[in-house]
Amino acid sequence: MTPADTLRFATRAATAWPLRTALMMLAMSIGVAAVVVLTALGDGARRYVVNEFSALGASLLIVLPGRTETGGVNAGSFVSSTPRELTNADAAALLRLSLVQRVAPLAVGNAEIAVGGRLREATVVGTSADFLELRGLEIGQGSFLPREDFNRASAVAVIGDTLRSELFPGQGAVGRMIRVGDTRLRVIGVLAPSGRGLGMTTDELVLVPVATAQAMFDTSGLFRIFVEARGREALPGAQRQVEERLRARRDGELDFTVITQDAVLGTFDRILGALTLGVAGIAAISLAVAGILVMNVILVAVTQRTAEIGLLKALGARAGTIRAAFLAEAALLSVAGALAGFALGHVGAWGVRLAFPELPAWPPDWAVVAALATALGTGVLFGVLPARRAARLDPVQALSRR
Amino acid sequence: MAQIELEHIDRIFKLGDSEVHALRDITLRIEAGEYVAVMGPSGSGKSTLLNLLGLLDRPNAGAYRLEGRDVTTLSADEQAAVRSARIGFVFQSFHLVPRLSAAENIGLPLVLAGVPAAERAPRVARALQDFGLEGRARHRPDELSGGQRQRVAIARATIMRPAMLLADEPTGNLDRATGHEVTALLEALNAAGTTLIVVTHDPAMGERARRRILMEDGAIRQELQAAAAAPEAPGSGSTAPPP
Ligand SMILES: Nc1ncnc2c1ncn2[C@@H]1O[C@H](COP(=O)(O)OP(=O)(O)O)[C@@H](O)[C@H]1O
Ligand SMILES: [Mg+2]
């Protein structure tokens, strides 16, 4: 039998039992669609986070108090206790390094914001003028924090756009006074809306000079220091300079950690990539289940068409011809199911993107290729057994079956 | 050299502990172009003999030479090739593929033999015409009468121009008139030179064959050669065209 005839014969056989074929395709397509949608979600989350962090700038160094062994980020980087604090003086010292362009110290806490009768809980970030450029933020009204000594606790604040609309509905905020904790501050600027729906947003932040925040929260230490090198190429040199300078300032002790943006990104990339892979793996299990279903469908087909197989043999069909015909049928069902699932998965991913516009939920190419290949592979693999059984049937006995 | 030469053929089916001797020591020669009826009570081994002749089954002992070639030692695929080229089967229950049209059923042996579609079409069209099925080409088996179904089956059995036709009770599922029609069709093919071996219960049909083999309990009990049979039929063994 020529390949074209084998395919035609298999197609006729598959379409002769439409319900069975449809159910079979449904199972296969659900498996493939699951892989496509879940990897789209996983990879979308990964890309979203990576983009979000990239917004911080590519030549960023982050200095954390405490020591973690690897250069990368692990749980310890975020919770390590502070052996010796990072101080404003440390931050100021870093600003004088040749390869460093910007420095923004960070002191963070929660406080109650009050304007007139209105009360609201908000995150207060103590930082410096460089923070604006460092984070790629834009000022909507007024001006950002003044460029001044890190130890100067000016009584000013810049607020996020959401806070502005909640605290000063329908009126200008710049120049007004707010109370943050026990401290009265003058609003000198409002950030432009950040326009992001998920994750970190600056719309609900109160930004104050770092010394102001430290006085508010009664601390002299810093949560971390953001350092921007003079360009991406200067990053390794800047990291070395930062480490040397800080070490010198603390009697040669290395009780702080300098990580790069790349390390943070790389870690998130790896974690979320692994997550996507795991999700894809779980979805692929449904493909294996579909494969077993293919096997059963073809086994039923072989039983149902036993007399036909006997006839084909009587008409001179070789064992290989019969094997090929049933394998082609299995492959056909798998491919059709996989393609349907592919379409279904893309519709699903489109739905996800519609529901969460900020999530770039596109299935990665590797997942699509892997899903289609797995579908075809399992279909054919699980088709082999019934196909061989068909080819081995004894023609006389097969013919006597009605 | 006879077309078919069976020597001391035994076929034994094992069912658990018991053995069924379906064929015992069958020795038989059939010349090309002969018309042979195999008769006998149910269970006497007629179908087993026919399956063996058609290379669908292998003997437990004995030799089978087809056109001078020992075919019992051939591999399964080699036997399939012989079936495809030399042997046509007609069954009592027609054995048409239900989802395929009459034309597709007739063309099936060509498809299996890998004959290209362009070459198949005219041969199938010709066969449809020869067997009076022109108007039925696109009909599926369930849309055909019993006689039409068997004609499709015969057209299918002869589309590869085999040297021999094996028919196992071809009229068994047909009414009397239709049975006669089908018998006449098979006899016409035999008259054109094809060896015809028919298993039948019907004495009337058996009477028509020039040679009758009577089986009983797996053995040949009696052979009748109708010496003066059918003078109008030209196709005797010696005058049949070579395969
Ligand atoms: N596959 C088989 N397994 C066991 N016994 C069989 C098988 N095929 C045929 N037989 C037995 O062989 C004998 C001859 O059968 P068969 O050739 O079909 O008879 P007939 O066609 O003359 O009615 C019967 O006794 C039958 O039961
Ligand atoms: Mg029988």
Image: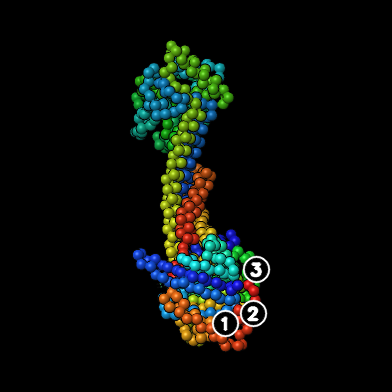
Residue at which label 3 appears: B119
In front of the other: A324 or A391: A391
In front of the other: B190 or B147: B190
Q: Amino acid at mark 2?
A: Thr
| Colour scheme employed for the rendering of this structure | rainbow
Nearer the N terminus, badge 2 or badge 1? 1
Looking at the rendered structure, the number of numbered marks drawn on it comes to 3
Residue at which label 2 appears: B239
The residue drawn where x is 46% and y is 77% is: B220
Q: Secondary structure at mark 3?
A: helix
The C terminus of chain A sits in image quarter: bottom left
Select label 2 or label 3 by which is in front: 2
Question: Taking A100 as reference, is B110 above or below it?
Answer: below
Q: Residues within 10 Å of mark 2 (few under 14, many from 20)?
A: few
Select label 3 or label 1 by which is in front: 1
The residue drawn where x is 64% and y is 74% is: B242
The residue drawn where x is 43% and y is 17% is: A254
Nearer the N terminus, badge 2 or badge 3? 3
Measure how far apart labels 2 and 1 are at the Cα level: 16 Å
Q: Residue A294 at x, y = what percent?
A: 45, 56
Q: Is residue A357 visible?
A: no
Q: Is there one chain holding both mark 3 and mark 1?
A: yes
Which of the 4 quarters of the picture holds residue A85? top left
Q: Residue A45 at x, y = what percent?
A: 46, 40
In front of the other: A143 or B229: B229
Residue at which label 1 appears: B187
